[in-house]
Image (cartoon, helix red, strand yellow):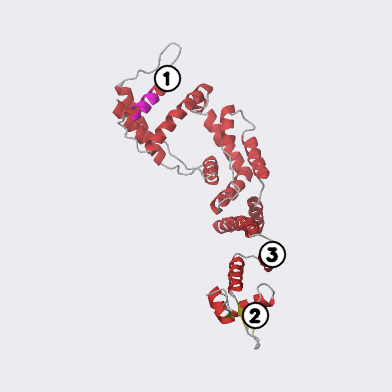
Amino acid sequence: MTTNEMYGIGDVARRTGLSVSAVRFYADAGVVTPAAITPAGHRLYDVAAIARLELVRTLRELDAGLDDVRRVLAGKTTLRELAAAHLELLTRQEARLRSRRAVLSAILRQDTTAEQATLMHRLAGMSDEERDRLIDDFWTEVTSGWEPPERMVEWWRSARPELPEHPTAAQLEAWIDLAELVRDSEVRVAVREELRQTCTTGAGPLMTSPQMLDNLEAATPIGQAAMDAARTGMPPGSPEAREIADRWIGWLTGIFATPDSPGMPDTPEFRLQAADHMLAGAEWDRTPPESPGPFDTYMALVTVINEKEDERFPFEWLAAALRASA
């Protein structure tokens, strides 16, 4: 192809990938006119016109309208400006499609009435402020009528959904399920009773006491170090693993310390016993509850919405590190 050569409409169609009728349409619409017309009325196009037609085809495949195409070809709009505008439009379209997909998936998973489908659609389109208000109302009701430990309430309220600006369909589906869950008055009653029983019966008062919560908070960095070590494949018998085991035992013996007693002695037998408890914890962790309560469901949905990995505590790794340190 040379700059001086002229091409017939059939050749132009083959070179641009457009149909002959499309090339004619763009000429008649004044988008890309032929460079010349023969006495017999045949349209001829030069290299510049073919390049413009190729650009038109690209823009049209990106869903640009004819007016937008004309502005780009006339130099009134840059390609960058057009791309930015269409990207913004496409982003909004994608958000609407994800919302619709989430609603349709939720409808298919349950026997949904027309009223419920309308509600699902509204839930999927809630603003950040509306979502926050719904979750706050839920926890206000769940923690009313009894006296839960203040720090536990802070922890419960901190575990809240944070839907990103561009959520996936799975995140939207989880949000719809969560929103329906927390709006249900029976669920609110069940969660309140579940948490009240957990905090006030059996070992609950001890486990939620300020001293025990302080102890559990002190264990957090040690547990995180163990999780990091297990994730990176640190050998349980390595000096680094021994340090983590020592920190864990130091924390564990300190739990039983009182002003009159230094606590449990750090002996090889105590470390082996702690390792056995770790293995029992691993077995418990692998056993899913027969019927998860509504609070467990709430936490599972928040995990999906926030796209956080449900990283399990490395009971077995820590057991091996404790045994090696004994």
Provide residue 234's location: percent of width, then percent of height.
34, 35
Mark 2: amino acid: Ala
The residue tagged 1 is 254
User: What separation in Å lies between label 2 and label 1 (alpha carbons)?
Assistant: 93 Å
Please tell me which residue lies in front, 320 or 287: 320
Image-quadrant location for residue 277: top left
Q: Residue at x 51, y 21 (%)?
A: 211
The residue tagged 3 is 71
Q: Residue at x 53, y 41 (%)?
A: 299
Image position of 267 (left or right of 148): left
- Counting residues from the N terminus, which is met first, the one under dot 2 or under dot 3? 2
Q: Secondary structure at mark 3?
A: helix
Of tags 1 and 3, the one toward the viewer is: 3
User: What separation in Å lies between label 2 and label 3 (alpha carbons)?
Assistant: 23 Å
Is residue 208 located in the magenta-colored stretch of the structure?
Answer: no
Mark 3: amino acid: Arg
The residue tagged 2 is 36
